[in-house]
Image (tube, grey):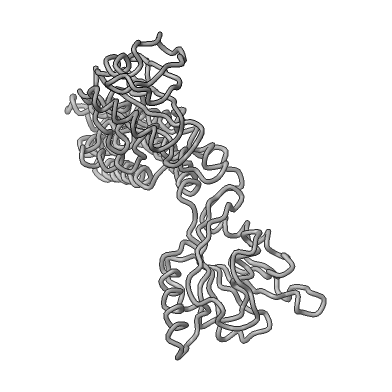
Amino acid sequence: MSAGGDTICAVATPPGVGGIGIVRVSGPAVRTICTGLTGSLPAPRHAVLSAFRAADGELIDSGIVLYFPAPHSFTGEDVLELQGHGGSHVLGRVLQRVRELGARDAHAGEFSRRAFLNDKLDLVQAEAIADLIESGTDAAARAAQRSLQGEFSRHIHDLQETLTGLRVFVEAAIDFPDEEIDFLAESDVLDRCAGAVTALDAVLAGARQGRLLRDGIVLAIIGRPNAGKSSLLNALAGADRAIVTDIPGTTRDVLREQIDLDGVPVHIADTAGIRETRDRIEAEGVRRAREALADADVALLVEDVMGPAAEDDALHREIPAGVHCIRVRNKIDLLPGGAAIESDTPDRVEISARTGSGIQRLRAMIRAAVGVRDQAEGAFSARQRHIDALLRARGHLEAGIAEMAASGSGELLAEELRLAQNALGEITGELLPDDLLGRIFASFCIGK
């Protein structure tokens, strides 16, 4: 049964020139389109070399045809894949012929949306497809694969089963009002609810790791002019990404780079030195530096070990309360013997961006600042909406426990359990408004 009712088509390979280009088609008109374009319908799941022809018989291209009959396809509908040569003009002509034969252009994410609506995968798995495509590190790709294989969904279903058991128990007690107080008070229902919170916290921890692997960390490098900020960016990136001179004020704008920090994407903003200045261009750079700082998850306050500590302390006080700050005392290679003069702490490290001394310790501190574990193998790809839903479910569980402990009210506990279960249902798409569903799939690429 088609979730869309009509037939959709799209180019499923990136724009540009390549050896192969793929046009994907899904819907009830697939067989007619395939016959009209190639002259025949191949056996299911058999690759066949065919000519792609226009309405007047002119040869458009030749390539591989793959036919996947419903329901054994990605979308659950009849699906056709046309693998031709990867030029934009020839793909455009193939796509135009497919439209003439009864298809329309797919909307962003419409193939995945049909797979979801036809119960071929749940919403978490559909989102994991997009996450896998967009993954920027090996760790992020592995996390997306785990979600695509259903690991995150299985955790959510296990939690829902636990809550279902609790609801059955509590609501059975409500059905016997003469015995309700004794029945619930003498049971282990509060312990079972607490166990559900513990299980939910474990899933929440994995989801937070997955969100970090997917979205990464926003890191602002700030400090006074000539403290070594650009040198630190180059040291973290392992390449010369920023111009480095001994002239204060060399960096006038925010330089943005992305690096792989041991499996975690890190979006770095190397900022202009923050100081009072009458130079209008430099002043604009300072203003943008403060904006980048406000948007950061972590700030690296780069300090020259040979410079005045009072100015660094004043800048430290400017850092917003929600931004984790690591004070990076740079240029220890200029000290006698190149040795650090203070012991490192969780919020302070001494380094030499020029020689690389202390950089590995700093990388570990950045990961620890946002809660990234040394081993993220148990993480699964997750988004902020998943974390928000888990937190709401946790809040309802805690509210139910508090109500039950205070008043012994089974009705209030049952209602909070129901709300917690609904919040979990939003994650897999079982209970999700259509407008939100549309926004989620709209972020996908057209061919998916």
Residue 187 in view here: no
Q: Position of residue 292 (x, y in %)?
A: 44, 69
Residues 446 and 11: in front is: 11
Q: Quadrant of residue 153?
A: top left
Q: Quadrant of the N terminus?
A: top left
Which residue occupies 76% across, 79% down? 335
Q: Position of residue 311 (x, y in %)?
A: 55, 85
Q: Residue furthest bottom?
A: 278
Residues 346 and 275: in front is: 275
Q: Position of residue 185 (x, y in %)?
A: 30, 34
Q: Position of residue 188 (x, y in %)?
A: 37, 31
Q: Quadrant of the C terminus?
A: top left
Q: Is residue 404 left or right of residue 314?
A: left
Residues 108 and 164: in front is: 108
Where is 261 relative to 108, above or below? Answer: below
- What count of labels does the image hold? 0
Where is 223 relative to 25, above or below? Answer: below
Which residue occupies 68% across, 69% down? 353
Q: Is residue 5 left or right of residue 189?
A: left
Q: Residue furthest right?
A: 337
Q: Is residue 152 left or right of residue 397?
A: right
Residue 292 in view here: yes
Where is 224 relative to 410, above or below? Answer: below
